[in-house]
């Protein structure tokens, strides 16, 4: 399989590295210090599932120099979707599948007009990774899972074949008929975890053990569920119990604050439009978290960077 990772950050670099280790032809689209480090010394992955040190990798900063591939792991930040999507055109051929591995719920909606409905595949990852330093990806925890599928639920034999090859490379990947639901399930969890940790500046262990913070945490997630239902998502009756299991499984020291800003931009601004023509529920708690973090950022810039105004 020919694969391109767009771009080779913590998530894309991890799964691309696993594919390269299994012998597949993987090109890592990267820039800056991370790109330079991979070119000099290879890519290191530190993980309880097995460390890797991959040398002599294909690294590029311009997709036009790569050409069409079989699979693109599209793992850029959500706010870079359109710009990166235009650049990804050079990687797309007649049988290419672009699997989105982004947070948020609208990446397929934004990417499909650029690349095409047949090409663009929804995806979600369940993994905690960071770039420990340029050229080094650190995976914490024992979970490294991908779920992918067409949002329209049409059968796709080409995609199914690619998924089988990824499974053979020891990647835990599932082809699902319920991708929209899976995307929203993850979004519900991230809206709560990122919102509560970013606004309180406390790790999840402290939040779980405090009755008031725990209650606020769950109210954040239920606001997101209400927005999802207004958008036509049918959450299963046992989803509340599933949330409980997820929350209980997180390490006490986990902090999702780095994910927060753009997730709440989605929720706090969604009331300006109506997904699917529906009436969107208000999200006062999500808006509150968004305001708290925004105010903290403005104060930081004022006190430490000498920019902006208080007030």
Image (cartoon, rainbow, N blue to C red):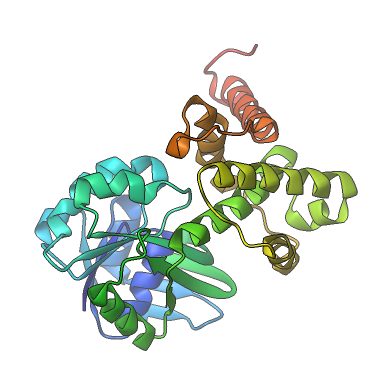
Q: Nearer the viewer, residue 63 or 40?
A: 63
Q: Residue at x 40, y 59 (%)?
A: 101
> Residue at coordinates 66% horizontally, 43% vertically from top-left?
195
Q: Is residue 301 left or right of residue 170?
A: right
| Residue sitting nearer the eye, 297 or 67 | 67
The spot of residue 269 in percent (x, y) is 52, 29
Rendering quarter of residue 305: top right
> Can residue 135 be seen?
no
* Residue found at the very far bottom of the displayed protein: 168
Q: Which quadrant holds residue 146? A: bottom left
Quick one: 44 or 200, which is closer to the camera? 200
Location of residue 301 with respect to 33 vertically, above or below: above
Task: Please state the total of marks drawn on the protein image.
Answer: 0
Residue in front for this viewpoint, 234 or 217: 234
Look at the image and tell me in which quarter the C terminus lies.
top right
Say if 109 sits above or below 97 in the image: above
Please name the residue shown 70% across and 43% down the image: 220
Q: Quadrant of the N terminus?
A: bottom left
Q: Is residue 141 shown above or below 228?
A: below
Which residue is painted at 74% across and 63% down in the image?
244
Left or right: where 283 falls relative to 210? left
Q: Position of residue 97 (x, y in %)?
A: 24, 65
Image check: 196 left or right of 232?
right
Instruction: Tell me: residue 262, above or below residue 12.
Output: above
| Image location (x, y in percent) of residue 216 | 78, 43
Instruction: Using the rendered view, name the quadrant where residue 48 is placed.
Output: bottom right
Q: Is residue 219 visible?
A: yes
Percent coordinates x, y for residue 267 in the rendering: 55, 36
């Amino acid at each position: 399989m020919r694969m391109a990772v767009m771009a080779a950050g913590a998530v894309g670099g991890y799964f691309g590295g696993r594919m390269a280790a299994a012998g597949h032809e993987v090109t890592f689209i990267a820039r800056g210090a991370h790109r330079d480090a991979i070119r000099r010394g290879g890519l290191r992955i530190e993980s309880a599932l097995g460390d890797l040190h991959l040398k002599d990798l294909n690294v590029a900063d311009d997709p036009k120099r790569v050409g069409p591939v079989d699979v693109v792991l599209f793992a850029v930040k959500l706010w870079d979707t359109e710009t990166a999507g235009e650049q990804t055109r050079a990687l797309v051929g007649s049988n290419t599948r672009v699997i989105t591995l982004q947070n948020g719920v609208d990446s397929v909606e934004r990417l499909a007009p650029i690349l095409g409905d047949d090409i663009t595949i929804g995806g979600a990852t369940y993994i905690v990774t960071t770039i420990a330093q340029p050229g080094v990806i650190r995976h914490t925890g024992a979970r490294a899972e991908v779920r992918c599928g067409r949002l329209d639920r049409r059968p796709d034999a080409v995609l199914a074949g690619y998924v089988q090859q990824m499974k053979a490379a020891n990647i835990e990947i599932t082809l699902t008929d319920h991708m929209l639901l899976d995307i929203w399930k993850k979004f519900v969890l991230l809206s709560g975890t990122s919102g509560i940790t970013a606004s309180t500046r406390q790790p999840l262990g402290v939040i779980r053990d405090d009755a008031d913070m725990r209650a606020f945490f769950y109210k954040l997630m239920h606001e997101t569920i209400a927005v999802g239902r207004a958008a036509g998502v049918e959450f299963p009756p046992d989803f509340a119990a599933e949330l409980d299991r997820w929350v209980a499984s997180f390490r006490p020291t986990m902090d999702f604050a780095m994910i927060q800003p753009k997730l709440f931009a989605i929720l706090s601004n969604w009331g300006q439009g109506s997904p699917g023509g529906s009436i969107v529920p208000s999200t006062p708690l999500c808006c509150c978290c968004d305001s708290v973090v925004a105010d903290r950022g403005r104060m930081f810039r004022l006190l430490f960077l000498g920019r902006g105004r208080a007030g």
